[in-house]
Image (cartoon, helix red, strand yellow):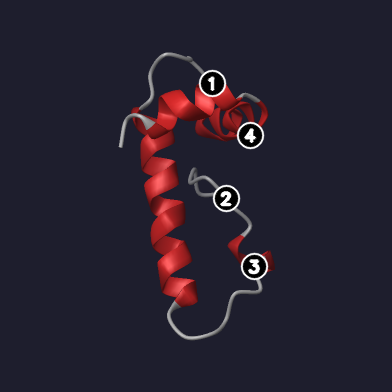
């Protein structure tokens, strides 16, 4: 693995119009926000899991935008 967060883009079935580019941009924004968040000291993949499980943490990450 190249050290980048993998969001399983290959499994994504979004193929019409500009949707692939739009979702790629949203994924990149999500990764950047997770990297900016410094309250929790863990890797980006663990932060992604934590945001999926804890709405308060998700709100904290989204507040960085």
**Is 47 rendered above or below residue 30?**
above
Taking depth in this image into account, of 15 and 6 the one nearest to the observer is 15
Q: Secondary structure at mark 3?
A: loop
Q: Position of residue 63 (x, y in %)?
A: 35, 29
Q: Please tell me which residue is depicted at 58% across the width and 26% down the height of the picture.
A: 55
- Label placed on residue 65: none
Residue position for label 1:
56
Q: Nearer the viewer, mark 4 or mark 1?
A: 1
Q: Nearer the viewer, mark 4 or mark 2?
A: 4
Q: Report if the CB atoms under discs 2 and 1 are less than 8 Å apart.
A: no
Q: Report if the CB atoms under discs 3 and 1 are less than 8 Å apart.
A: no
Residue position for label 4:
52
Circle 1 Cα neighbour tier, 10 Å, few/some/many (<14 / 14–19 / ≥20):
few
| Residue 43 can be seen in this image | no
In three-dimensional space, the C-alpha distance between marks 2 and 1, rounded to whole angstroms, equals: 23 Å
Residue position for label 2:
6
Identify the mark nearer the N-term, 4 or 3: 3
Q: Nearer the viewer, mark 2 or mark 1?
A: 1
Identify the mark nearer the N-term, 3 or 1: 3
Q: Secondary structure at mark 1?
A: helix
In three-dimensional space, the C-alpha distance between marks 3 and 2, rounded to whole angstroms, equals: 12 Å
In three-dimensional space, the C-alpha distance between marks 4 and 1, rounded to whole angstroms, equals: 10 Å
In three-dimensional space, the C-alpha distance between marks 3 and 1, rounded to whole angstroms, equals: 27 Å
Circle 4 Cα neighbour tier, 10 Å, few/some/many (<14 / 14–19 / ≥20):
few
Q: Report if the CB atoms under discs 4 and 3 are less than 8 Å apart.
A: no
Q: Nearer the viewer, mark 4 or mark 3?
A: 4
- Label placed on residue 12: 3
Q: Nearer the viewer, mark 3 or mark 1?
A: 1
Q: Nearer the viewer, mark 3 or mark 2?
A: 3
Q: Secondary structure at mark 4?
A: helix
């Amino acid at each position: 693995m190249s050290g980048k967060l993998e969001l399983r883009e290959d499994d994504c079935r979004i193929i019409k119009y500009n949707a692939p580019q739009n979702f790629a941009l949203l994924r990149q924004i999500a990764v950047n926000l997770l990297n900016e968040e410094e309250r929790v000291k863990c890797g980006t993949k663990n932060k992604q899991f934590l945001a999926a499980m804890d709405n308060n943490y998700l709100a904290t990450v989204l507040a960085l935008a």
